[in-house]
Every structure is written in structure tokens, then in C-alpha cells.
């Protein structure tokens, strides 16, 4: 809320932005000392984190969020008539100084988390295997060990700093792309290094290294609150391998549920069992992406019955078998009977490229309604390209 208020004030009076940054910088200097003492206390005594509630962590987070809002405003208003170039440069220089001063705090945070993760009291709770077992048996994520919530505001502050306050160049504050983050991830693991990635490494490698080192606790927090990926933990979405599979699945399903909250007209198809591929293809291939988001209702010609979900599941299973049947010439098995790749002879199938796009739509619709294909495709570029065509057209 404070960050939004400051942003609106700066929109009306850009010249005051530097003053706000200066005052927030002073506040951050005082808070950093208190925060480091607090983290050091947690690190020295396991009982301290259980008995102490953190006010400093939330204060640091609010200041960092306010600074990120001001930096965004600063970049949106480069007009010299609104803000002198010297004031603009001084403000960004001050942000750089704040980043440097915060490095010691992030190091203390990392040490504190390492102490938590190595404690026998916390190990079992943070184990992905244990967490998955608890989620499967009870339907909810296991509770975090008492006191660990005190660390969360500091982690959120670090992520906001990495995303918004660490520009690779002094005049370029921008949100990192997924490819940027993957490059930084590769570079941080020593597999790739070049002069062209120097600024990129400075900008993102700290985040990647921190997240790799403390992946277990970060994923434990996400299990408790998947909404973190929409907010302060959103930077982790740029490097998906840092997120455990169960958290990716929960995030994906939450996005699907959000889409389903919007009303879409139902999609009705009528197919013959003997020609299920052809009938489904002809009735679905020309549907718009918005149509495909609607509830699918299937009717088998010559049969009575109302589709309450069972017929759709049966249609999906039958269609999947036909799609991957060798007679359809679309896919061929690789190594075993459950792994498939595009069939080189698919060119003999009329409109084979359009059929591959249709298969992608079927897979996409299955994901939307939580029905999975009873088969595995190889990770070849060809397969991904064909299926992505359907995915993009369906979504």
C-alpha cells in the first residue's frame, strides 16, 4: 500500500522521487543493522527462532517494495524536463549503494537458512518426499516447523531486490526474461562463461545461487502458500527447475482453476465410435481457443445417455488409443509400447500436419480438464513443435 501511494505521488511530482529514495535509504541502513542482529540470533540459537516474532523482516520488506516502486517510476520518467539527468543518475547510484550495503544482510540470511535446514528438527518437515506423502494422504501440505515464518519476509525482500533493484546496467532496470534467468543459471553452475554475460551474471546469478542452495526451504514455503509464485517468489518461475514438481502442478492447476472461473459456452460434439478420430477432428479442429475452454460434452451416435463426465473420459481414452495406433500413421513407438514419437510415414496421412495440431489440442484439453494421455512422447524438437501448435491454439 505504501509503495503504491509513493508511486502515485511521484507520478504527480517526479522531482520528489530522489528525496523519497534518500529517506528510504536512511531507513534501510538502520533496519539492516537490526535485521542482521536478529538473523544472527536465529543462527546462534534454534530456540530463538521459535520464541521470537520478527518485526524487522516485515519492515525491510516494506522498504524494499517501496524502493522497487520508486525505481520503476524513475525508469518510466526519463524526460529531462520532469527530472534532471543528474538527479536521475544520483538516484540510481543511491540504489546501487543500497544493493551493496544489503549484501551482508543476504549473506547472514543464507547462513541462517543453512542452520535451519541442517537441523534434525527441521529436516523431516522440509523433505520433498515427506511433504508429497503428507499432501497425498491428507490433501494439504505439511505444516512448516514453528518459527520458520519469521524468515519468510527476509527471503521475499531478497527476491524483490534481485528482480527490481539489481540492474545489470545503471540505466536499465527491467524485468528479466526466462532465457536471461536460464543463462544466469547455466553460468552460475560453471557450464558457461563469457564477457557478454558479465552484467547478466551480476544481475541474476546471486538469485540463482541462493535459490539452488536453499531450494528445499523455498519449496516448503511454496507448498504452504502457492500464491507466493504469483507475488514475491515470481522470479522462480523464470527458472522452473528450481521448483519441485508438486509445486509446479499445484501452480498449474491454480491457473487452470482461475480460467475456469470465467464463463465459457459449452462445446458439444457427436461422434461415431468407429470413426472417433475423424469425427472428433472434423468437429474440433475449427473451434476457436475460447470455444475449447468451454465444458466438453460428448455424445456417441446411436447410443442413449447423458454426459455427466463419464462419456467424456471414455471418449478421451478411446480417442487416445486411436491417435497412437500405428494404423493412424501419426506416431510410432520408441523402445517400448508406451513411448511415442512422430511417425516418419505420417506424410502418407492426408492433412497430417493438421492432425498433429489437433493432437496438440486434445492434449491441451486433457490438461485443462485434468485428463492425461495413457502414453509418453519423446522430448524431440519435432514432437514439442507439433504439440505446442495445439497448445497455443487451444489456450
Image (spheres, rainbow, N blue to C red):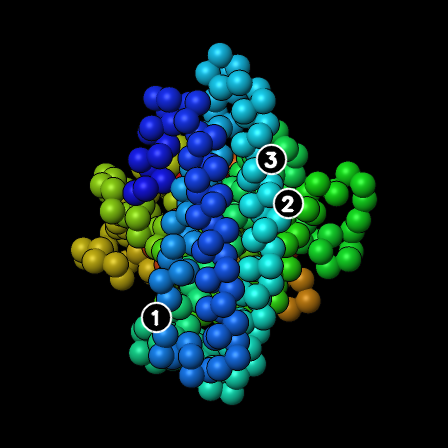
Residues 76 and 296: in front is 76
Name the residue beneath numbered marker 2. Answer: 203
Kindly report the distance in space between the C-alpha atoms of the residues bearing marks 3 and 1. 34 Å
| In-image side of 367 versus 128 (left or right) | left
Q: Point out the tag, 3 or 2, that comes first from the N-terminus.
A: 3
Residue 286: horizontal and vertical position, in percent?
Answer: 40, 32
Kindly report the distance in space between the C-alpha atoms of the residues bearing marks 3 and 2. 15 Å
Kindly report the distance in space between the C-alpha atoms of the residues bearing marks 2 and 1. 32 Å
Any mark on residue 93, and which? Answer: 3
Residue 382: horizontal and vertical position, in percent?
Answer: 65, 45
Local SS, label 3: helix
Residue 363: horizontal and vertical position, in percent?
Answer: 46, 51
Residues 167 and 31: in front is 31
Residue drawn 57% across and 30% down?
A: 90
Any mark on residue 53, and which? Answer: 1
Any mark on residue 244, and which? Answer: none
Q: Is residue 4 visible?
A: yes
Count residues near mark 2 (Cα–Cα under 10 Å), then give few for <14, some for 14-19, many for 20+. many
In the depicted structure, whether residue 40 falls above or below residue 393 = below
Q: Which residue is farthest bottom?
A: 120
Q: Point out the tag, 2 or 1, that comes first from the N-terminus.
A: 1
| In-image side of 184 versus 157 (left or right) | right
Amino acid at each position: 500500500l505504501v509503495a503504491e501511494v509513493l508511486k502515485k505521488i511521484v507520478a504527480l511530482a517526479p522531482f520528489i522521487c530522489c528525496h523519497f529514495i534518500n529517506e528510504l535509504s536512511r531507513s534501510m541502513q538502520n533496519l539492516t543493522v537490526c535485521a542482521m542482529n536478529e538473523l544472527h540470533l536465529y543462527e546462534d540459537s534454534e530456540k530463538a527462532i521459535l520464541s521470537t516474532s520478527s518485526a524487522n523482516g516485515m519492515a525491510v520488506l516494506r522498504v524494499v517494495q517501496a524502493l522497487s516502486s520508486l525505481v520503476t517510476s524513475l525508469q518510466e520518467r526519463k524526460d529531462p524536463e520532469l527530472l534532471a539527468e543528474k538527479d536521475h543518475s544520483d538516484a540510481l547510484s543511491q540504489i546501487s549503494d543500497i544493493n551493496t550495503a544489503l549484501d551482508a544482510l543476504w549473506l547472514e540470511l543464507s547462513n541462517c537458512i543453512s542452520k535451519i535446514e541442517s537441523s534434525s528438527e527441521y529436516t523431516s518437515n522440509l523433505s520433498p518426499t515427506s511433504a508429497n506423502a503428507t499432501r497425498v494422504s491428507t490433501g494439504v501440505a505439511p505444516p512448516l516447523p514453528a518459527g520458520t515464518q519469521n524468515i519468510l519476509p527476509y527471503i521475499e525482500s531478497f527476491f524483490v531486490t534481485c528482480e527490481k533493484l539489481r540492474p545489470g546496467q545503471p540505466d536499465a532496470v527491467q524485468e528479466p526474461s526466462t532465457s536471461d534467468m536460464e543463462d544466469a543459471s547455466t553460468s552460475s553452475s560453471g557450464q558457461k562463461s563469457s564477457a557478454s554475460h558479465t552484467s547478466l551474471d551480476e544481475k541474476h546469478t546471486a538469485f540463482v545461487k541462493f535459490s539452488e542452495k536453499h531450494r528445499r526451504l523455498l519449496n516448503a514455503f511454496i507448498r504452504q502458500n502457492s500464491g507466493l509464485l504469483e507475488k514475491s517468489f515470481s522470479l522462480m518461475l523464470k527458472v522452473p527447475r528450481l521448483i519441485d514438481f508438486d509445486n509446479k502442478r499445484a501452480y498449474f492447476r491454480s491457473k487452470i482453476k482461475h480460467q475456469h472461473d470465467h464463463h465459457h459456452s459449452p462445446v458439444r460434439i457427436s461422434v461415431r465410435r468407429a470413426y472417433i478420430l475423424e469425427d472428433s477432428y472434423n468437429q474440433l479442429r475449427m473451434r476457436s481457443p475460447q470455444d475449447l475452454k468451454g465444458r466438453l460434452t460428448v455424445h456417441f451416435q446411436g447410443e442413449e445417455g447423458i454426459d455427466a463426465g463419464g462419456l467424456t473420459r471414455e471418449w478421451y481414452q478411446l480417442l487416445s488409443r486411436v491417435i497412437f495406433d500405428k494404423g493412424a500413421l501419426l506416431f510410432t513407438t520408441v523402445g517400448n509400447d508406451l513411448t511415442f514419437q512422430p511417425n516418419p510415414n505420417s506424410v502418407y496421412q492426408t492433412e497430417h500436419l493438421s492432425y498433429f495440431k489437433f493432437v496438440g489440442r486434445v492434449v491441451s484439453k486433457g490438461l485443462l480438464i485434468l485428463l492425461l494421455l495413457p502414453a509418453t512422447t519423446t522430448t524431440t524438437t519435432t514432437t514439442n513443435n507439433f504439440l505446442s501448435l495445439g497448445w497455443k491454439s487451444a489456450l
